Amino acid sequence: MNLLCLVFFMSNRSPRESVDAVLAATKQSSRLYGHGLGMIASENIISPNVKRAINSDLHGRYAEGLPGKRYYQGCDDFDTIEGIGIDLAKKVFQANFANIQSTSGTVSNIGALKALAKPGDAITAVSTADGGHISHARMGAVGLRDLNVSTYPWDEERMEPDIDGSCKLIRDVQPKITLVGQSVFLFPTPLRELADAAHEVDSTVMYDGAHVLGLIAGGVFQDPLREGADVMTGSSHKTFPGPQGGFLLSSSEDETFHRRLNNAMFPGVCSSYHLHHVAGKVVALAEFEAFGQAYASDIVRNAKAFASSLAAEGFEVLAESRGYTASHQVLTRHGEIDSGAGASAAKKLEDAGIITNMNMLPGDTKAMSPSGLRLGVQELTRVGMGVREMNEVASLYARVLLHDEDPKTVRQDVQHLKSDFQHVHYCFDSESLPAYEGM
Ligand code: DSN
């Protein structure tokens, strides 16, 4: 459809029709994931009680400031919610400081960069080609804060920053912020070594745990706040299974530093901070306290099983020498570097009802035609799938991508498999709402 047709088509819809179209597309999207396999590593589903909190009157309210110190009246009940949330976040992440206002992982990063550096300062980070997040780059939040970024040398075999080269870089550049963590995150960062180098040159260590926050809180990945990170940021909706939003956490006991971090969130980067999502986040924290350890260890067990099954089917799975993964993610290569094989694999899988994303892998230089896929098992784990289902999913991948079976035929088996996994696990009142339906 060309642009002119698109504009005509769009303007031709009445307001009523637009409402109906949105509601129908919302339902259709729930159906896509309800019948299919959601395997995008940055996504998850929310529990019935998180849904209830999100669907509350709080969605339209304001509460600028902190509990007990507000700019608006009417906040007493929300003060209770945010107060419980701050306490729970400190407990779940074993942090001395927690701010739960951030509306996303990127917003947490913008806030941290604001608190920790001035325009023109230096920062070190993982490059986006090696799996760093866009907010760690000049094109994203780092550029918005006008920081000069130098990227770590990358160890492709171990899929982590090269330790000696990165420590040398930190000592040479003496960055204001030593930023670590990625969006392609298979193994724990060698944090103690990098943090030692950073602290020698008075650099603040910032760990972006967006992808692995649930694994960290569940005690199955690494423990950044005790391995040298001064500040940890992250999303509340990936392996930490809450609503969309973010966290800003710190190991520091310094109250002046806490004030700086709080001020960076408000008035720094948020005015309204989506109170309904904060309420949902607090419910998710409480549920994580009860069920999170089991969830986190089941995710990692499933990711390892899925990776091994894919390799046994004949796929090229990265990081074989390290057991493929220690997180929720698995990386597969589907053709030559920069060939776009990852893009076509993702499309075929979508036709079979398996939702993934193409991803650059070591050697790839083109974000839109990479050779690989990044796969996450956190959502399948959350609906109760285990090792047996991981083997089954790997064989569905093989039918589509290795044996050229018609994706539409495979889709029927995807739907059949998924029909037994329709409720969120690792939460209270699991059966009270189906996972993929509205409220
Ligand atoms: N772009 C997201 C991811 O998929 O990793 C993080 O913001």
Image (tube, grey):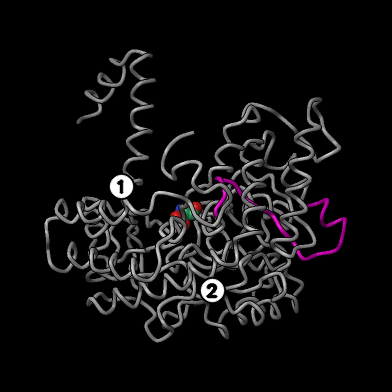
Would you call the spot at circle 1 few (<14 residues within 10 Å), some (14-19), or many (20 or more)?
A: many
Q: Front-most of 70 and 123? A: 70
Residue at the disc numbered 1? 35
Question: Which residue is rendered at x = 31% and y = 43% of the image?
Answer: 32
User: Image quadrant of residue 269?
Assistant: top right
Q: Does residue 236 lie above or below 14 as drawn?
A: below
Image: magenta residue range: 241-260
Instruction: Kindly state the secondary structure of the residue where label 2 is placed.
Output: loop
Q: Position of residue 31 (x, y in %)?
A: 33, 40
User: Image quadrant of residue 88?
Assistant: bottom right
Q: Is residue 269 magenta?
A: no
The answer to whether the beta carbon of the residue marked 2 is less than 8 Å from any atom of ligand 1 is no
How far apart marks 2 and 1 lie (CA) works out to 41 Å
Q: Does residue 276 lie above or below 389 as drawn?
A: above
At label 2, which amino acid type do we have?
Answer: Tyr
Q: Is residue 243 magenta?
A: yes
* For residue 201, side relative to residue 158 (left or right): right
Q: Quadrant of the N terminus?
A: top left
Q: Front-most of 344 and 49? A: 49
* For residue 415, side relative to residue 132 (left or right): left
Q: Position of residue 331 (x, y in %)?
A: 36, 70
Q: What label sits on residue 348 in the rendered view?
A: none
At label 1, which amino acid type do we have?
Answer: His
Residue at the disc numbered 2? 152
Q: Position of residue 37 (x, y in %)?
A: 33, 54
> Who comes first in sequence, dot 2 or dot 1?
1
Q: Does residue 199 lie above or below 1 as drawn?
A: below
Would you call the spot at circle 2 few (<14 residues within 10 Å), some (14-19), or many (20 or more)?
A: many
Question: Which residue is rendered at x = 75% and y = 63% of the image?
Answer: 95
Q: Position of residue 143 (x, y in %)?
A: 57, 52
